[in-house]
Image (spheres, rainbow, N blue to C red):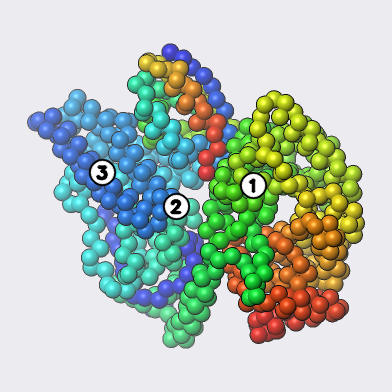
Amino acid sequence: MISQTFKITNPSGFHVRPTKTFVQAANQYPCKITVINKGKKVNGKSSLSMLTLGIAAQEEVTLEIEGEREDEAMQELGKLFTEVHE
Amino acid sequence: MRQTFKGIGASPGLAIAPAFIWKTEEAYIPQESRVEDREAEASRFQAAVDQARVDLEAIRKSTEEKLGADKAEIFEGHLLILEDPDLIDAILENVRETGINAEFALHETSQSFIRMLEEMDDELLRERAVDIKDVSGRIMRHLRGVAGSDLSAMPDECVLVAEDLTPSDTAQLDLNKVRGFITEVGSRTSHSAIMARSLDVPAIVGAGVGLRSIQPGTLVVMDATEGVLLAEPAAEELTAYREKKTAYDRRKAELALWKDKETLSSDGRHVELAANIGKLEDVQKALDNGAEAIGLFRTEFLYMGRTELPTEEEQYNSYKFVLEKMDGKPVVIRTLDIGGDKELPYLNLPKESNPFLGQRALRLCLERPDLFRTQLRALLRASRYGNLKIMFPMIAIVEEFLEAKRILEEEKRKLLAEGVEVAEGIEVGMMIEVPAAAVSADLFAKEVDFFSIGTNDLIQYTMAADRMNETVAYLYQPCHPSVLRLIRMVIEAANREGKWVGMCGEMAGDQTAIPILLGLGLHEFSMSAGSILPARELIGRLSHEEWRGFSREAMSLTRQDAIQQYVREHTLGGQPA
C-alpha cells in the first residue's frame, strides 16, 4: 500500500464537480482507493461517501492506494486534489 | 382573500396566471420485511436502478439540447449516484446477505447519506442531499411500479406552486404552460434555482409553508425580481402588474438582441465592453451577458476568508482557469489590492488611523515583495493560456510603477531561466485612482501599456469624501466637472502616447456617464455583467458625432445635476436613468 497527503488548493473546496472527476478517474483503476480527511476514511470510488467528507479549501487529504497500478493511480488522483475547478 | 408571500427571487421576471398546486408525492416510508428469494429481490432492485438510468439518460439528453452541456452536468452527477458502490452495491449486498426487502434497504441507505449531507456546514453540500432524494425517489417509484409524477392535469397557463422541485422536475417543466414557479424550500444556489435562471423562468424559492393556503386556480401575480407573490390581487394591483410585465418583457426582448453583437456606435465606431469579476464563477456570467473581455479581475478573493497566504500553485490554477475560459479574449488581472479597510488578519498589519491614505494595495506589495513575487510568478506562468494583461493598483508616483514593473521583469527572467514558458508581450498597465496619477498621466503614459480609471476611489480622493459616510456622501459625484476633467486629462495623455484607456469603476456602467465618457474617447468600459447589455444598446443608439456633443456640453456645465439632466434629456427623453 502507498500513501500520500495533499492540500486542497481549489478556493471553494473539493465539491460536487471535482468529486465527480475524482470518482470517475478512481474507477479506472483496479486498486482499492481510500480517502482520509479529518480522521474519517471513505471509499474513493463512491462520490456520495466522498461528499460526506465535506472537504474544504486548504484542508489536507490523505490518499491510500493498494493494488495493481497503485503508483500510476496516486499520480493521477493526487493531481486532482491540487487543481482548480469551478 | 388577498394574500402576500415573500421568498427569495431565484430567477427574475414577472408572471400572472392561475396557481397550479403541485403536491409532491408524500415521502414513501416502506415497511421492513423478509423475502423468500433473495436473488430475485436483488434482481428486482437492479431492474429498478436500470429503469431509473433510462429515465435520467433521457432527461440528461433533453436538458443538454435545451440548455447545453453545462446544465446537463447535474444529471451526469445523478447517473453517477446510480453507479455508486456505497449506495447501490451496498444495498444489493444487504438484500443478498439478510434477505431484507429492497424498498427498505434503499430507504435506509439513502436516508443515511441524506442525513449526513443535511448536517454539513456547507450550504452547497447540504443541497446535494436533494440529488440523493431525487435519485433514490426515482428508484423507489420504479420498485413500487408508480413511476412518474403526474403533471398532466396542469392547465395551459399557470404558476406552479410546490413544496420543492427536484432538478429533474425542473428540467421537465412544460414551458409552454408554466409561467413561473414558487416553492416552499430552496435557496438561490439550489439546482432548481440555477435551472430556473437558465430556463429563463421567473422563480421564487424558500417562500415557506404558508404557500399551502393558496387555493388551486386562484389568480396569482408573481414578481420574481422582488421575490413577492400576491394571491387574489386587487383590481388596481393587477392592472399595475400587467403594465409592469409588458414593459419588462419588451425591455428584455430589446436587450436580448444586443447579446452577440459587437459594441458599435450607430455609425460604426467600436468600443470594448468588459466585465468586472471577483470570483471564478463570475466568468460564466460575464460571457452569458456578452462581455468582450474581463476588464478587472479582482484577485482579493484568493486571499480573503482564510488563515494563510494562497500558494503560487493555487493562484496559478485560478488565473489559468479564467484565461482559458475567456478563450483568447483580453483578461486584465489586478494585483493584490488589500490593506486599509480590507484586512487580512494573518498578515498582522498595524492599525492605521487613515487606512485609505495608508499602506494599501501596491504600496503593501512593494513592502512585502515575498507575497508580491508569488503572485507575479503565478500570473506569468498562467500567461500562456490566454490574453493576460497585468494591472497595478493605487499608484501615485512614477517610481512605484517602475519598481513594480522591475520586479515583474525580474520574476519573468527567473522563470525563463528555469525553463518555464511565459507569453510574449504581456501588456502591463496601472489603475488611475489617485488624483496625483491623473494629473501627471502624461508622465505615466510614457511608461505603461494602458490605464484603467478606477472611479470609485478616484472620486473619493478627488472630493476628499468617503462615500460610506452619509454626511458627506453628497460629494460623491461621478459627473462633477473636477472628476470629468481628471478623466479627460488621463484619456488625452494616453492618446498622445498611443496607449489605451479603460474604466473599471461603477461609473463605467452608469447610463448618464457613458455618453460623456464615449465623447471623451474612453476605449474600454468594464462593469458588472448585468450592465453590459443596457450599455451596448445605449452606445448603439448614438453616433460618434453625438458622443462628442455630449462631452463638449458636459465640459461646459458647472454642476453635476445639470450635466446629468442634459444627458438624460438627450438619451432617454428626460426619464430618470
Q: Where A72 falls versus B471 (above or below)? A: above
Q: Secondary structure at mark 3?
A: helix
Q: Which mark is residue B54?
A: none
Give the letter of the chain under mark 1.
B
Q: Where B499 falls versus B368 (above or below)? A: below
Q: Secondary structure at mark 1?
A: strand
Q: Nearer the viewer, mark 3 or mark 1?
A: 1
**x and y percentages locating residue A76 in the rendered image:** 47, 26
Q: Which residue is mark 3?
A: B53
Label 3 to label 1, Cα distance in Å? 42 Å
Q: Amino acid at mark 1?
A: Asn
Q: Which mark is residue B190?
A: 2
Residue located 29% across and 57% down the image: B24
- Residue nearest the observer in this picture, B454 or B256: B256
Same subunit: marks 3 and 1: yes
Q: Which residue is mark 1?
A: B387
Q: Secondary structure at mark 2?
A: loop
**x and y percentages locating residue A35 in the rendered image:** 45, 25
**x and y percentages locating residue B84 in the rendered image:** 32, 34
Same subunit: marks 1 and 2: yes
**Position of the N terminus of chain B by quadrant:** bottom left
Give the letter of the chain under mark 2.
B
- Residue nearest the observer in this picture, A19 or B421: B421
Q: Amino acid at mark 3?
A: Arg
Q: Is residue B299 left or right of residue B431?
A: left
Give residue B180's quadrant in the image: bottom left
Q: Nearer the viewer, mark 3 or mark 2?
A: 3
Q: Amino acid at mark 2?
A: Ser
Label 1 to label 2, Cα distance in Å? 33 Å
Residue located 71% across and 74% down the image: B544
